[in-house]
Amino acid sequence: MLDLMANLPPSPKSSAAYRAILKEAKHQGLTAYALAKDTGLSINTVRGFLIQRGSPTLTTVEAIARALGLAIQVSPIKGE
């Protein structure tokens, strides 16, 4: 099975949350197939997320984060 996460550095344009999710996926050694199975998302959706193609929906980000044992937290921006 092809490991799409093997040598993918996070894009500098991606958010800290996105980078943290990619880092955790790589750390856990999960394949796109395993994440698709765990999340119920299509393999194409998960692959797109992992190779940073397009703009994932919040639902996609949350599903992948949850499958990795992570939570998305929203906080007020300081000074606003």
Image (cartoon, rainbow, N blue to C red):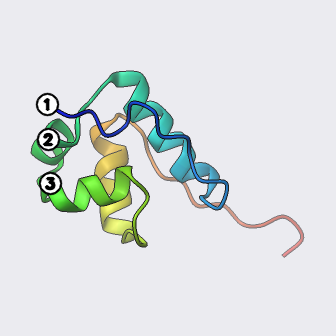
* Residue in the picture at 20% in, 34% down: 2
Residue furthest to the bottom in view is 80
Q: Is residue 20 left or right of residue 29?
A: right
Dot 1: within a 10 Å radius of its alpha carbon, few (fewer than 14), some, or many (20 or more) residues? few
According to the image, label 2 marks what residue? 33
> Pointers 2 and 3 in contact (CB under 8 A)?
yes
3 or 1: tag closer to the N-terminus: 1
Q: In the structure shown, which secondary structural element does the residue marked by tag 2 occupy?
A: helix
The amino acid type of the residue labelled 3 equals Ile
| Distance from the alpha carbon under mark 2 to that under mark 3 | 6 Å
* Residue in the picture at 18% in, 60% down: 44
30 lies above or below 70? above
Q: Is residue 67 left or right of residue 27?
A: left
Q: In the structure shown, which secondary structural element does the residue marked by tag 1 occupy?
A: loop
Between marks 3 and 1 in the image, the one whose residue lies nearer the viewer: 1
Between marks 1 and 2 in the image, the one whose residue lies nearer the viewer: 1
x and y, in percent, of residue 15 in the image: 61, 57
According to the image, label 1 marks what residue? 1
According to the image, label 3 marks what residue? 43
> Pointers 3 and 1 in contact (CB under 8 A)?
no
The amino acid type of the residue labelled 2 equals Tyr
Q: How many numbered discs sit on the rendered protein? A: 3
In this rendered view, identify the residue nearer to me: 9 or 74: 9
The image's mark for residue 67 is none
Residue furthest to the top in view is 28
